[in-house]
Image: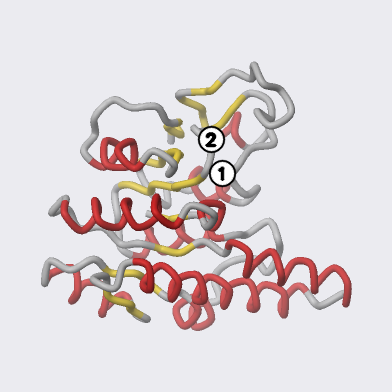
Amino acid sequence: MKIGGSLLKHPEKIRRILELLAETGKKVLVIPGGGVFADTVRKVSEELKLTDSAAHKMAVLAMDQYGFLLNSLYPEAVLCRTLMEVKKISSRGKLPILLPSNLIFSTDALKHSWEVTSDSISCYIASLLCAPKLVLVKDVDGIFEKDPKKKRNAKLLHEISCETLSKICSCVDNYLPKLLLRRFVTQCFIVNGMYPERVLKVLEEKKTLCTKILI
């Protein structure tokens, strides 16, 4: 489960999500988004014309920073740097939060581009764990046919195919549909973290407001 940086203005919602994840009894790995830390990297990259490789690595390190923030909001979770640590912590009934930079730098399997954000990185990590489900927690209800911030009556798409997703502008990065088409995970959901109970319902496979990406 990726917890997006867009929720940073609502730390109480983040804390509640982490509490629910810890209480559910399911094995869940939390992957941090980039948030304002990645936004800063993007701004500096544009101003100073950084190389794609430098910007990519700095943005991945931004995810580490957000991971430390998540752990500060919920100290009962445990920070991990390797998938072996993740499995060990999870087997002990604790909630792991992955700081992904070591893993991403060592495998170097993803494109060095702003097309690849924490969405695609989370999908890649899920594939390494053979996780059946990827949940992307954002500050919107899901994927809309048009930008809901510009079109108030935009229709929420409860389901969308990877092929269609790759052709529209949405709240996920451009590279994610390509990974999903390659079957990196078998299920993917977009859910609004402003409603922590929805996040829990997605995990429990109960009906709730969200978007399911058909793979």
Residue at the spot of label 1: 177
Q: Quadrant of residue 152?
A: top right
Locate residue 204, reporting x and y percent. 21, 38
Question: Which kind of residue does numbered mark 2 sit on?
Answer: Cys
Residue at figure coordinates x 33%, y 77% from the top left? 79
Residue 77 left/right relative to 177: left
Locate residue 200, reporting x and y percent. 27, 42
Locate residue 198, reporting x and y percent. 33, 36
Residue 114 left/right relative to 202: right
Residue at figure coordinates x 60%, y 29% from the top left? 164
| 177, 72: nearer the viewer | 72
Q: Residues within 10 Å of mark 1 (few under 14, many from 20)?
A: many
Q: Residues within 10 Å of mark 2 (few under 14, many from 20)?
A: some
- Asked which secondary structure carries label 1, the reply is helix
**Lower position in the chain sequence, tag 2 or tag 1:** 2
Q: Alpha carbon of mark 2 to alpha carbon of mark 1: how far?
A: 5 Å
Residue at the spot of label 2: 162
Question: Which kind of residue does numbered mark 1 sit on?
Answer: Pro
Residue at figure coordinates x 59%, y 34% from the top left? 165
